[in-house]
Amino acid sequence: QVQLVESGGGSVQAGGSLRLSCDASGSTNGMAWFRQVPGKEREGVAAIRIPDDSPFYGDSAKGRFTIAKDNAKNTVYLYMNRLKPEDTGMYYCAAEISGGFVLRASSFKYWGQGTQVTVSS
C-alpha cells in the first residue's frame, strides 16, 4: 500500500506558474498527475516511469509543464508554467502502474486526495 499526499495547489492568474508536489510513502514503478473537472473524466497530464525517469505528457501539458522526480525522496513534482484558465481543476497524484497506457487513469493503482488549481483570466 502506497499513500500519496499532494500539495502546492492554489489560485493564480493566467500566465502564472505553480509547482505541485506529491509525496509517496513508498517506492513505485511510476507516478503521474491527472486532473479532473466536474462532469468530465480524469485527464492524464504527465507521468514518469521509475527508475529510468522517462516522462510522458498529455497534449495539454506539452511545452508548458514538466514532471520531475526527486531521487532522494519518493516525491514527484509537476512544474506548471504559462497557466491557462482551462488548466483549472482538481489535480490528483497517482502511483504504481499496473498496466496499460501511462496517461490513463485505469493504469494506476494508488491515488492521492487531490489538490485544487484555479487559474483566473
Image (tube, grey):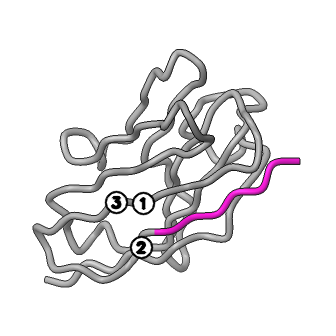
> Residue at the spot x=59%, y=70% of the render?
114
Q: Amino acid at mark 3?
A: Arg
Question: In the figure, is residue 62 to the left or right of 24?
Answer: left
Q: Check if mark 1's residue and mark 3's residue have beta carbons within 8 Å.
A: yes
Q: Can you give x and y, in whole percent of width and height, for residue 22 in the image?
A: 56, 55
Residue receiving disc 2: 9
Disc number at residue 114?
none
> Magenta stretch: residue 3 in it?
yes
Task: Point out the image quarter for the C terminus.
Answer: bottom left
Q: Can you give x and y, in whole percent of width and height, for residue 21 in the image?
A: 48, 57
Name the element at disc 1. strand
Question: In the figure, is residue 4 to the left or right of 69?
Answer: right
> Residue at the spot x=77%, y=56% of the render?
3
**Which portion, as a residue range, is magenta?**
1-7
Residue receiving disc 3: 19
> Magenta stretch: residue 20 in it?
no
> Residue at the spot x=69%, y=27% of the render?
29
Above or below, 111 relative to 88: above
Query: Where on the picture, by quarter, is residue 63?
Result: top left
Q: Check if mark 3's residue and mark 2's residue have beta carbons within 8 Å.
A: no
Q: Amino acid at mark 1?
A: Leu
